[in-house]
Amino acid sequence: MSSAPPDIAVPVRRRRLLPPRPPRAGDVGFALSLLFVEVAVWMLRGILAGFTLVPVTTAEFDHSQLVFAGWEIGIAIAALAIALPAALLRAPWTACIQLLVAVVVGVMGLSAQHHYGDTTPQPAPTDTYYAPCYSGTDCERN
Protein backbone atom coordinates (compact mmCIF):
# COMPACT_ATOMS: atom_id res chain seq x y z
CA MET A 1 0.00 0.00 0.00
CA SER A 2 1.29 3.33 -0.89
CA SER A 3 0.47 6.28 1.24
CA ALA A 4 -0.26 9.73 -0.03
CA PRO A 5 2.49 12.29 0.42
CA PRO A 6 1.95 14.42 3.49
CA ASP A 7 0.64 17.91 2.95
CA ILE A 8 3.47 20.31 3.37
CA ALA A 9 2.42 23.61 4.80
CA VAL A 10 3.77 26.49 2.82
CA PRO A 11 4.57 29.45 5.05
CA VAL A 12 2.31 32.37 4.32
CA ARG A 13 4.06 35.68 3.96
CA ARG A 14 2.29 38.35 5.88
CA ARG A 15 2.11 41.83 4.48
CA ARG A 16 3.76 44.45 6.59
CA LEU A 17 1.38 47.15 7.64
CA LEU A 18 4.10 49.76 7.95
CA PRO A 19 6.10 50.99 4.97
CA PRO A 20 9.85 50.51 5.00
CA ARG A 21 11.89 53.16 6.71
CA PRO A 22 13.12 55.94 4.44
CA PRO A 23 16.85 56.48 4.15
CA ARG A 24 18.27 58.61 6.95
CA ALA A 25 19.70 61.25 4.59
CA GLY A 26 16.33 61.73 2.91
CA ASP A 27 14.52 61.91 6.25
CA VAL A 28 16.93 64.49 7.70
CA GLY A 29 16.91 66.52 4.48
CA PHE A 30 13.12 66.59 4.38
CA ALA A 31 12.94 67.50 8.07
CA LEU A 32 15.39 70.39 7.67
CA SER A 33 13.64 71.68 4.55
CA LEU A 34 10.30 71.68 6.40
CA LEU A 35 11.96 73.48 9.31
CA PHE A 36 13.35 76.08 6.91
CA VAL A 37 9.91 76.64 5.34
CA GLU A 38 8.25 77.01 8.75
CA VAL A 39 10.86 79.50 9.98
CA ALA A 40 10.52 81.46 6.73
CA VAL A 41 6.71 81.62 7.09
CA TRP A 42 7.07 82.66 10.75
CA MET A 43 9.57 85.41 9.92
CA LEU A 44 7.65 86.64 6.87
CA ARG A 45 4.44 86.91 8.86
CA GLY A 46 6.34 88.79 11.57
CA ILE A 47 7.83 91.22 9.07
CA LEU A 48 4.48 91.85 7.41
CA ALA A 49 2.81 92.45 10.78
CA GLY A 50 5.56 94.83 11.89
CA PHE A 51 6.52 92.53 14.73
CA THR A 52 9.74 93.24 16.58
CA LEU A 53 11.49 91.29 19.28
CA VAL A 54 11.72 94.41 21.42
CA PRO A 55 9.37 94.28 24.43
CA VAL A 56 6.40 96.59 24.07
CA THR A 57 4.82 98.82 26.68
CA THR A 58 1.12 98.99 27.39
CA ALA A 59 0.54 101.97 25.11
CA GLU A 60 2.37 100.42 22.16
CA PHE A 61 0.58 97.06 22.10
CA ASP A 62 -1.83 96.67 19.23
CA HIS A 63 -4.01 93.92 17.84
CA SER A 64 -1.61 92.93 15.07
CA GLN A 65 0.50 91.15 17.66
CA LEU A 66 -2.54 89.17 18.76
CA VAL A 67 -3.05 88.17 15.12
CA PHE A 68 0.62 87.17 15.01
CA ALA A 69 0.01 84.92 18.04
CA GLY A 70 -2.86 83.31 16.14
CA TRP A 71 -0.53 82.65 13.21
CA GLU A 72 1.96 81.03 15.59
CA ILE A 73 -0.72 78.66 16.83
CA GLY A 74 -1.66 77.92 13.20
CA ILE A 75 1.96 77.05 12.42
CA ALA A 76 2.04 74.77 15.47
CA ILE A 77 -1.10 72.97 14.31
CA ALA A 78 0.39 72.59 10.81
CA ALA A 79 3.57 71.13 12.33
CA LEU A 80 1.48 68.61 14.25
CA ALA A 81 -0.42 67.77 11.07
CA ILE A 82 2.91 67.01 9.38
CA ALA A 83 4.34 65.11 12.37
CA LEU A 84 1.54 62.53 12.46
CA PRO A 85 1.98 61.20 8.89
CA ALA A 86 5.75 61.39 9.32
CA ALA A 87 5.49 59.16 12.38
CA LEU A 88 3.19 56.76 10.55
CA LEU A 89 5.58 56.65 7.59
CA ARG A 90 8.42 55.83 10.00
CA ALA A 91 10.41 59.02 9.41
CA PRO A 92 11.73 59.63 12.94
CA TRP A 93 13.79 62.76 12.25
CA THR A 94 10.93 64.53 10.50
CA ALA A 95 8.45 63.56 13.21
CA CYS A 96 10.72 64.64 16.07
CA ILE A 97 11.66 67.98 14.51
CA GLN A 98 8.02 68.74 13.68
CA LEU A 99 6.95 67.90 17.24
CA LEU A 100 9.70 70.17 18.57
CA VAL A 101 8.58 73.00 16.26
CA ALA A 102 4.96 72.50 17.32
CA VAL A 103 5.83 72.69 21.01
CA VAL A 104 8.11 75.73 20.72
CA VAL A 105 5.86 77.77 18.42
CA GLY A 106 2.71 76.70 20.27
CA VAL A 107 4.13 77.82 23.62
CA MET A 108 5.17 81.14 22.08
CA GLY A 109 1.69 81.68 20.61
CA LEU A 110 -0.14 80.72 23.79
CA SER A 111 2.18 82.90 25.86
CA ALA A 112 1.51 85.87 23.60
CA GLN A 113 -2.23 85.34 23.87
CA HIS A 114 -2.00 84.91 27.63
CA HIS A 115 -0.11 88.17 28.10
CA TYR A 116 -2.36 90.08 25.71
CA GLY A 117 -4.91 90.69 28.45
CA ASP A 118 -2.20 92.02 30.77
CA THR A 119 -1.07 94.66 28.30
CA THR A 120 -4.45 95.76 26.98
CA PRO A 121 -5.13 99.27 28.28
CA GLN A 122 -8.07 99.64 30.63
CA PRO A 123 -10.84 102.08 29.74
CA ALA A 124 -10.63 105.56 31.22
CA PRO A 125 -12.39 105.94 34.55
CA THR A 126 -15.76 107.63 34.54
CA ASP A 127 -17.28 109.97 37.09
CA THR A 128 -18.66 108.09 40.04
CA TYR A 129 -21.41 110.65 40.61
CA TYR A 130 -24.22 110.51 38.12
CA ALA A 131 -27.64 112.01 38.75
CA PRO A 132 -30.13 111.76 35.94
CA CYS A 133 -32.14 114.86 35.30
CA TYR A 134 -35.80 114.13 34.68
CA SER A 135 -38.16 116.69 33.25
CA GLY A 136 -40.04 118.65 35.86
CA THR A 137 -37.33 118.22 38.51
CA ASP A 138 -34.79 120.66 39.79
CA CYS A 139 -31.37 119.55 38.45
CA GLU A 140 -27.97 120.86 39.35
CA ARG A 141 -26.02 121.82 36.29
CA ASN A 142 -22.25 121.70 36.39
Image (cartoon, rainbow, N blue to C red):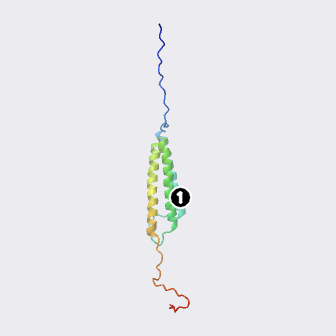
Percent position (x, y) of residue 43?
Answer: 51, 58
* Front position in the image: 15 or 111: 15
117, above or below 75, in the image: below
Residue ranking furthest to the front: 136
Percent position (x, y) of residue 48?
Answer: 55, 62
Q: Residues within 10 Å of mark 1 (few under 14, many from 20)?
A: few
21, above or below 127, in the image: above
Residue ranking furthest to the top: 1
Q: SS of the residue at dot 1?
A: helix
103, above or below 86, in the image: below
Percent position (x, y) of residue 123?
Answer: 48, 75
* Front position in the image: 85 or 2: 2
Who's the residue at 45% across and 50% down the image? Answer: 99
Who's the residue at 47% across and 11% down the image? Answer: 3
4, above or below 24, in the image: above
Q: Which residue is mark 1?
A: 44
Percent position (x, y) of residue 54?
Answer: 45, 65
Who's the residue at 50% across and 55% down the image? Answer: 75
Q: Answer with the quarter of the image where residue 135 lies.
A: bottom right
